[in-house]
Amino acid sequence: MLMQTQMHVGTDMSKDSFDVAIRIGERFHQAKFDNTLQGFNRFLKWLKKLTLCQPRIWMEATGRYHEALASWATEQGYQVIVANPRAVRRFAQSRQTHHKSDSCDARMIAHFGESDPPKVRPWKLQSSVKLELRDLQLEVDGLKKIISQEQNRMKCGLHSVTVIETINENIDFLRGRIKRLREECVRLIEGDRDLSKVYAGLMSIKGIGSITAIVLIVRIDFDAFQKGRQLVKYAGIDPCEWTSGTSVRKRVHISRQGHSSIRTAMYFPALAAMRSDPETIAFAQALLERGRPKKAVICAVMARLLRAAFAVVRDGRSYSPQFSRI
């Protein structure tokens, strides 16, 4: 068998199993394995039988189902790429694909890898502290949704005093749980030398408090970016222009194609900075005087704070006014 320069394995992950596809010559070879350590070992044997080179393993970010295989494959020395599901879906649409199954998805992910998509980064192992922080933050997000549901129930015209009291007790209990989870997040961060330095740098930015700093640490891999504007784009706060000829000219808006949790986390810090930070007040006022809408100004302040967050983490020191110009 001829050795190829680079081969690509597409994997479609699910809770209990994963489908794989690799193209050798003009033929696709496919198989299915259990999403367990035994299945991973059988997958490795299958790969070694098919090819002499070490291929890239491509997969989509599907909840947490892909993480075990990604960690195992990385430890085995394979290069793992966890692709954006939206990018894979749009690639499939561009090929006018009409079928949808696990095996078809595995082939499509392999095709996506062969297309050499731009700006892909190898997946890297996360520390146990960051994984625990992620679980804690996800639990906080889930409890906040339950509180919102309980508060909505209070607005539906309840007549029972007992039910109202029960709902209020539930809300108070859930808020207490959230407080304890956040305290545990701070304890873990302060116990880690690198994360505690990042935490202190983020907290030095006017407008960003403990809650926002925790979300940014959990949601953002700062080492993956070279410039602050890349982080802004990752969060979906970058401006998006939509014009065509002379007839189509939509209002410029943010792309909203990044992590909504980051945008949500940055909203109230932006408002706080616009009220209390003289530099941010002057920045926002200048935009308002130029006729920018209030929402656009808030988004601009959010982007400004994110660029400052990138700068303090990159340089490993506290906030300085010059960071806002990065």
Image (cartoon, rainbow, N blue to C red):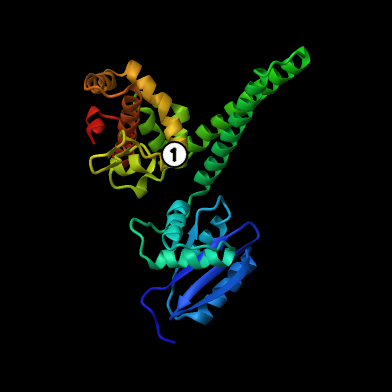
Which residue shows up at 40% across the image and 86% down it? 2
Which residue shows up at 51% across the image and 80% down it? 50
Residue 312 horizontal/vertical position (percent): 31, 36
Is 103 situated left or right of 226 in this image? Answer: right
Which residue shows up at 23% across the image and 44% down it? 245
Q: What is the three-letter code of the residue carrying label 1?
A: Ile
Establish if 74 lies above or below 150: below
Please state the total of marks drawn on the protein image: 1
Residue 209 horizontal/vertical position (percent): 43, 26
Tell me the element at label 1: helix
User: Toward which corner of the image does residue 262 lie, by quadrant?
Assistant: top left
Depth check: give the residue in front, 169 or 186. 169
Q: Identify the residue under disc 1.
A: 217
Pick out the residue farthest to the front: 247
Establish if 289 lies above or below 228: above
Pick out the residue farthest to the bottom: 1
Establish if 160 lies above or below 326: above
- The reply to whether residue 79 is visible in this rendering is no
